[in-house]
C-alpha cells in the first residue's frame, strides 16, 4: 500500500480528528512497531445482546483512525480486532428473546456455554457472535473476529492468566481503593468457574501456585483448589480488559465516556502486568430527543434499521463521524439534516485542494473517492414535496413532480435520489404527516400571499427557481405588508402553505411543486382566512 507524498504531507498537519488520533500512534511508534508487526486496533462487543448502533459507531470510528494511520505512516500494516467478551456470565435474562425460562436456569454461566434460545447455534454467545459478524460484513468492515471463550478455552490466554496470578497482590492494590467496603470484601481479580455448577463465581480466591494456575476458593460451602487455566476462569472486567490488551498486542481502542474510570484502572493494571495502555479516544454518549441517555432497556434510542429506513448509510456515517467528543441526540428528527449535510460535503469534495479534502468528512467515509454525481434535489425539499402531496403519495407521483426540476428525471439515471424518494415517503408517513397542520394566515400575511399569487401567475411554469426566490424575497421585504423581517415571512409561508414551522428554499420548492400547484396552496390558505373571519 503506497500513498502520494502530497497526501501524507497534508495528513501530517490535518486537524481532522482521525488524523489527530492517528498521530498518537506515530508518536508511540516513531520507527514503526518493532519487528514490522502490524499496529493492532480493537473494538469490544458484549454478546448478551444483539449488535446495535453503538456497535456500528465504534467499529466505524476505529476504522477511520486505522485508515488515517495507514496514510500517515505511508502504508504501515494494521489489524482491526472485533473482540467478543463471550466468557461473561449471564447476569439477567434479556427481555426481547425467546426461551426466558430456559435462560433463567443458566444465570451466571458463561454466555458461550448457555444453549442458544433461538435453536440455531452451539450457544447463546455463538448466535450473537454470528449476528455481529453478519452485521459487520453487511457494512463491509475489514476486521478479524476474536472470541474470548475460544482464547480462554484453548489456552491461548493461559500465559496471560499466569501473569495475573504472579501480580495478584499488586492488582488488588490497584483495585481495592476504588471499591466500596462491601464490594472490596468479596472482590477477586480472578473469577473461577465452578466445576460443579458451571457458574462464573464471584468469590475471593487465594493464589496457591501461579505457574500451574492453581487457586483456592469456596464453592457451595466447600474449599476447592482448582486451576484457572484452560477455560476454568474468567477475569474481572477491568483486569480482563488489561490482560487482553497485552495478550493481543492492542495499540488502540476507543471507548465511551461511561467507561472512563474503567479505562484508568485497566491502564494501571496493564502497567502492573508489564505492559502499556493502548492509545484511544473517549467518546461522548448518545442522548434521546429529551436529552436523556440512550438505554437499550428503556428503548428510547434509534436502531440502525430505523435510521436506514429514513436515511442513507452514508448519512449515518457522517452523523457518527462528526464531533465524537460531543454528546449527540439520536432520534429520527436528526436524519434529514444528516442526509443533506452528507451530500453538501460530497459536492464540495472534488474541487477542494488536498488539505481541505482531509477536513471533509466524506473523504474519510469514502476513503477519498467521494460521489460520482451530486444530488439534484435536497432531502429536505423532497420531504416538503411529499408532505404536501399527503399520506397517499407514491414514488411515481413524486417522480412526476421531479420531472419539473431535474434534468433526465428517471430513477435509473439518479439511483441515489430514487433511494431517497422511498425514504422520504417513509419518513413523511411515520414522522411528518401526523404533525402537519396548516394555520390560517394573518391579515397582513394574506395580503402578501395575494401579491405572491399574482406574481406567480405572471411568472408562469417556466420561471426559474432563482427568479421565483427573488419574487418571494421582494414581497417579504415590501413594507406595505408590515412583516417585521424575512424570517417571519418565510415562517408564515411554511406554516400556512406546508403545515410546518420549517421548510425549504421557497423558490426551489415552487419550481419543484409547480407554479399552478403552489397557487392552489395559496388559494386554500386564503380560503382558510375567510373561514376564520
Image (cartoon, rainbow, N blue to C red):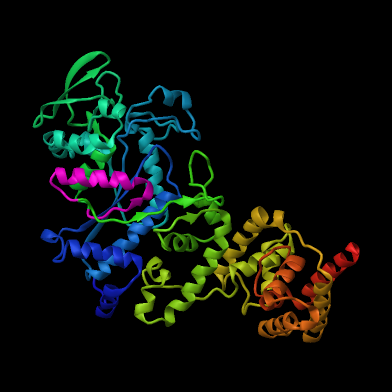
In the image, taking residue 389 as reference, residue 94 lies left or right, namely left
In the displayed structure, would residue 344 be above or below residue 250? Answer: below
Q: Magenta stretch: residue 84 in it?
A: no
x 63%, y 77%: residue:
406
x 21%, y 58%: residue:
39
Is residue 247 something that shows in the picture?
no
Spot occupied by residue 238 in the image (x, y as percentages of width and height): 27, 40
Spot occupied by residue 472 in the image (x, y as percentages of width and height): 72, 80
Spot occupied by residue 168 in the image (x, y as percentages of width and height): 15, 34
x 42%, y 39%: residue:
49
Q: For residue 506, which quarter of the picture?
A: bottom right
Q: What is the magenta segment's predominant secondary structure? A: helix
Spot occupied by residue 471 in the image (x, y as percentages of width and height): 73, 84
Q: Which residues are magenta?
A: 251-276
Q: For residue 473, which quarter of the picture?
A: bottom right
In the image, taking residue 418 as reference, residue 285 lies left or right, namely left
In the displayed structure, would residue 256 be above or below residue 38? Answer: above
In the displayed structure, would residue 73 be above or below residue 258? Answer: below
Observer-nearest of 75 and 62: 62
Quadrant location, the N terminus: bottom left
Quadrant location, the C terminus: bottom right
Q: Magenta stretch: residue 271 in it?
A: yes
Observer-nearest of 123 and 266: 266
Amino acid at each position: 500500500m503506497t500513498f502520494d507524498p502530497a497526501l501524507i504531507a497534508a495528513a501530517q498537519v490535518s486537524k481532522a480528528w482521525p488524523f489527530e488520533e492517528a498521530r498518537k500512534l506515530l508518536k508511540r511508534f516513531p520507527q514503526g512497531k518493532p519487528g514490522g508487526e502490524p499496529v493492532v486496533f480493537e473494538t469490544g462487543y458484549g454478546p448478551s445482546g444483539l449488535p446495535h448502533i453503538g456497535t456500528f459507531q465504534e467499529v466505524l470510528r476505529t476504522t477511520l483512525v486505522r485508515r488515517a494511520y495507514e496514510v500517515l505512516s505511508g502504508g504501515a500494516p494494521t489489524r482491526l480486532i472485533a473482540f467478543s467478551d463471550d466468557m461473561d456470565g449471564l447476569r439477567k435474562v434479556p427481555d426481547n428473546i425467546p426461551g426466558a425460562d430456559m435462560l433463567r436456569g443458566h444465570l451466571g454461566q458463561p454466555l458461550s456455554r448457555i444453549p442458544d434460545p433461538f435453536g440455531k447455534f452451539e450457544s447463546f454467545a455463538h448466535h450473537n457472535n454470528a449476528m455481529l459478524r453478519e452485521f459487520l460484513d453487511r457494512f463491509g468492515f475489514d476486521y478479524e473476529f476474536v472470541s474470548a471463550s475460544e482464547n480462554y478455552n484453548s489456552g491461548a490466554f493461559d500465559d496471560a492468566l499466569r501473569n495475573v496470578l504472579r501480580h495478584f497482590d499488586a492488582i488488588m492494590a490497584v483495585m481495592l481503593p476504588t471499591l466500596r467496603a462491601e464490594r472490596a470484601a468479596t472482590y477477586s481479580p480472578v473469577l473461577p468457574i465452578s466445576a460443579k455448577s458451571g457458574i462464573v463465581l464471584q468469590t475471593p480466591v487465594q493464589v496457591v501456585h501461579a505457574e500451574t494456575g492453581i487457586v483456592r476458593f469456596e464453592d457451595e460451602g466447600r474449599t476447592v483448589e482448582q486451576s484457572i487455566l484452560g477455560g476454568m476462569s474468567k477475569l474481572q472486567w477491568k483486569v480482563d480488559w488489561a490482560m487482553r490488551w497485552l495478550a493481543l498486542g492492542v495499540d488502540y481502542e476507543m471507548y465511551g465516556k461511561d467507561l472512563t474510570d474503567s479505562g484508568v484502572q485497566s491502564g494501571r493494571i496493564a502497567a502492573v502486568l508489564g505492559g502499556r495502555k493502548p492509545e484511544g479516544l473517549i467518546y461522548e454518549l448518545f442522548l434521546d430527543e429529551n436529552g436523556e441517555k440512550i438505554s437499550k432497556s428503556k428503548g428510547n434510542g434509534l436502531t440502525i434499521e430505523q435510521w436506514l429506513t429514513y436515511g442513507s448509510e452514508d448519512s449515518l456515517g457522517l452523523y457518527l463521524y462528526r464531533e465524537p467528543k460531543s454528546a449527540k441526540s439520536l432520534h429520527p428528527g436528526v436524519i434529514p439534516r444528516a442526509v443533506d449535510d452528507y451530500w453538501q460535503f460530497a459536492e464540495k469534495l472534488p474541487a477542494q485542494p488536498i488539505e481541505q479534502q482531509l477536513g471533509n468528512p466524506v473523504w474519510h467515509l469514502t476513503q477519498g473517492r467521494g460521489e460520482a454525481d451530486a444530488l439534484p434535489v435536497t432531502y429536505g425539499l423532497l420531504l416538503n414535496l411529499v408532505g404536501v402531496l399527503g399520506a397517499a403519495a407514491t414514488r411515481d407521483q413524486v417522480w412526476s413532480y421531479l420531472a419539473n426540476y431535474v434534468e433526465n428525471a428517471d430513477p435509473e439515471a439518479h439511483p441515489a435520489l430514487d433511494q431517497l424518494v422511498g425514504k422520504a415517503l417513509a419518513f413523511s408517513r411515520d414522522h411528518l404527516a401526523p404533525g402537519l397542520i396548516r394555520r390560517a394566515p394573518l391579515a397582513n400575511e394574506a395580503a402578501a400571499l395575494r401579491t405572491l399569487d399574482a406574481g406567480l401567475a405572471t411568472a408562469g411554469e417556466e420561471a426559474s427557481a432563482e427568479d421565483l426566490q427573488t419574487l418571494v424575497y421582494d414581497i417579504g421585504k415590501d413594507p406595505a405588508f408590515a412583516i417585521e423581517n424575512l424570517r417571519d415571512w418565510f415562517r408564515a409561508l411554511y406554516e400556512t402553505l406546508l403545515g410546518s414551522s420549517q421548510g425549504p428554499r421557497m423558490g426551489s420548492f415552487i419550481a419543484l411543486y409547480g407554479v399552478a400547484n403552489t397557487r392552489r396552496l395559496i388559494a386554500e390558505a386564503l380560503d382558510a382566512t375567510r373561514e376564520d373571519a
